[in-house]
Image (cartoon, grey):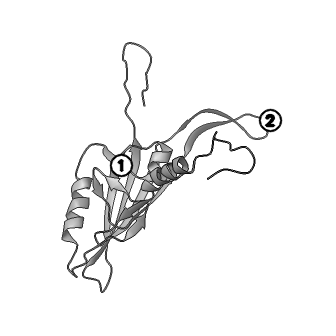
């Protein structure tokens, strides 16, 4: 196959290479349920795929604002970016019409780990978030469903740093 158009922006056009790059990109977009049904953007925490989960991520900057007499507005100084805040929610479902005890135990076990957890998700990978600390876990009821349990997790991003007491603070990501 030949490429007939304006010069290809990434060098010589090669359909096989393009398909390979697209396949690698798609790997992070889809996972499979226990029944083999594909789903969008799986979320894995410490090797456990959270069932039917969705994620939202937010971040804020901390800005010190100083008002100056006779000046309209404020002077902004010393700002930094806070940790990313993650909200993960999902539905644990047992396909044998029984309570999803295994998934609930796994999610609770993750919450009981008192150290940073590894997260694998396309969105967090793009944002540079590799580890998180779980802050809260909530199980909500769903009336009339014995084989389904709603859960939600809040977490913050975590990154390693090394503080050298003898010199200035050194931060390594």
Which residue corresponds to the image point at 36% horizontal and 17% vertical from the top-left?
165
Identify the image quadrant of the C terminus. Answer: top left
- Which of the 4 image quadrants contains residue 38? bottom left
Residue 123 x %, y %: 48, 52
Query: 10 Å neighbourhood of mark 2: few (<14), some, or many (≥20)?
Result: few
Which residue corresponds to the image point at 65% horizontal and 50% vertical from the top-left?
2
Label disc, if present, on residue 43 of the rendered structure: none
Residue contact at pointers 1 and 2, CB within 8 angstroms:
no
Residue 58 in view in this figure: no
Q: CA distance from mark 1 to mark 2?
A: 49 Å
**Relative to residue 112, is residue 72 drawn left or right?**
right
Name the residue that disc number 1 marks. Answer: 119
Residue 64 in view in this figure: yes
Residue 129 x %, y %: 43, 44
Residue 32 x %, y %: 35, 65
- Residue 72 versus residue 82: which sits nearer the camera? 82
| Residue at far bottom of view | 144
**Relative to residue 40, is residue 17 drawn left or right?**
right
Name the residue that disc number 2 marks. Answer: 70
**Relative to residue 128, is residue 10 drawn left or right?**
right
């Amino acid at each position: 196959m030949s490429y007939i158009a304006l010069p290809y922006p990434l060098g010589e056009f090669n359909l096989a290479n393009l398909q390979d790059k697209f396949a690698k990109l798609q790997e992070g977009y889809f996972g499979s349920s226990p029944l083999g049904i594909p789903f969008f953007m799986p979320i894995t925490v410490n090797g456990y795929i959270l069932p039917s989960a969705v994620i939202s991520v937010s971040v804020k900057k901390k800005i010190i604002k100083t008002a100056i007499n006779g000046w309209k507005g404020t002077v902004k100084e010393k700002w930094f970016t806070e940790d990313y805040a993650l909200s993960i929610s999902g539905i644990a479902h047992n396909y044998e019409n029984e309570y999803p005890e295994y998934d609930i135990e796994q999610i609770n076990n993750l919450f009981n780990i008192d150290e940073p957890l590894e997260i694998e998700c396309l969105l967090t990978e793009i944002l540079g978030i590799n580890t998180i600390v779980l802050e809260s876990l909530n199980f909500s009821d769903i009336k009339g469903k014995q084989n389904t349990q709603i859960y939600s997790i809040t977490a913050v991003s975590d990154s390693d740093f090394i503080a050298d007491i003898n010199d200035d603070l050194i931060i390594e990501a």
